[in-house]
Image (spheres, helix red, strand yellow):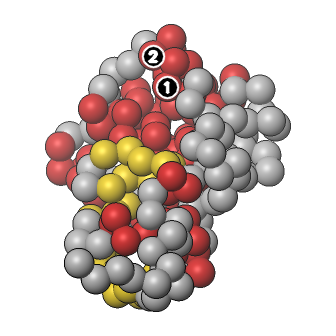
Amino acid sequence: MTRLAANQRHAVHLTLNGKPCSGEAEPRMLLTDFLRHEIGATGTHVGCEHGVCGACTIEIVGNLARACLTLAVQADGCDVRTIEGLAPAPDRLGALQAAFKRNHALQCGFCTAGILMSLDHFLRENPRPSEQEVRDLLTGHLCRCTGYAPIVRAAMEAAAEMADRPAKEKSDA
């Protein structure tokens, strides 16, 4: 068995928000650092680096993951979705993003990317959540600015709007 040096770089190929991309990573490079510094996808934030705050939440192969707890080499060959892939077009906000804007559900914005990723995933799985279910989901995220009330309002508003759309519109949103 060949032992690799800790600083040896490895090619990492993944699909990021529907587009193939690649870069190089040392074996211990975190996916957050790879996304931000190697690929240039800076929307995923680095908060606690312990998986507690939720700022780095992304989707890997359709499952929510903390990018600060994932090594870049673990994402090799995977489909990765970040906050940059949430909007339907560069000049359009998605329903959830627009609801956040209307409800002033962000202030400093540091936690917002992770919260939006979790809520987007959650609302696709549970299109008509109760307010308590939204609040339970948010327990995995730390926000020090909003007090969560506007976030919950925005999530409930977006859920209602998204649930009432025809299937074709949902895929475009």
Spatial CA span between label 1 and label 2: 6 Å
Marking on residue 56? none
Please, what is the three-letter code of the amino acid marked with disc 2? Glu
Quarter assignment of residue 42: bottom right
Does 43 sit above or below residue 61?
A: below
Q: Can residue 104 be seen in this view?
A: yes
Per the image, the residue denoted by label 1 is 137
The kind of secondary structure element at disc 2 is helix
On the picture, is 173 further left or further right than 167? right
On the picture, is 108 further left or further right than 8? right
Residue beneath the point at 34% across and 87% down = 11
Picture coordinates of residue 70 (x, y %)?
Answer: 45, 57
Per the image, the residue denoted by label 2 is 133
Please, what is the three-letter code of the amino acid marked with disc 1? Leu
Residue beneath the point at 20% across and 40% down = 166
Task: Mark 1 and mark 2 in contact? Answer it, CB < 8 Å.
Answer: yes
On the picture, is 85 further left or further right than 101? left
Residue beneath the point at 38% across and 19% down = 129
Q: Can residue 93 be seen in this view?
A: no
Q: Looking at this view, is 143 or 66 the one in front?
A: 66
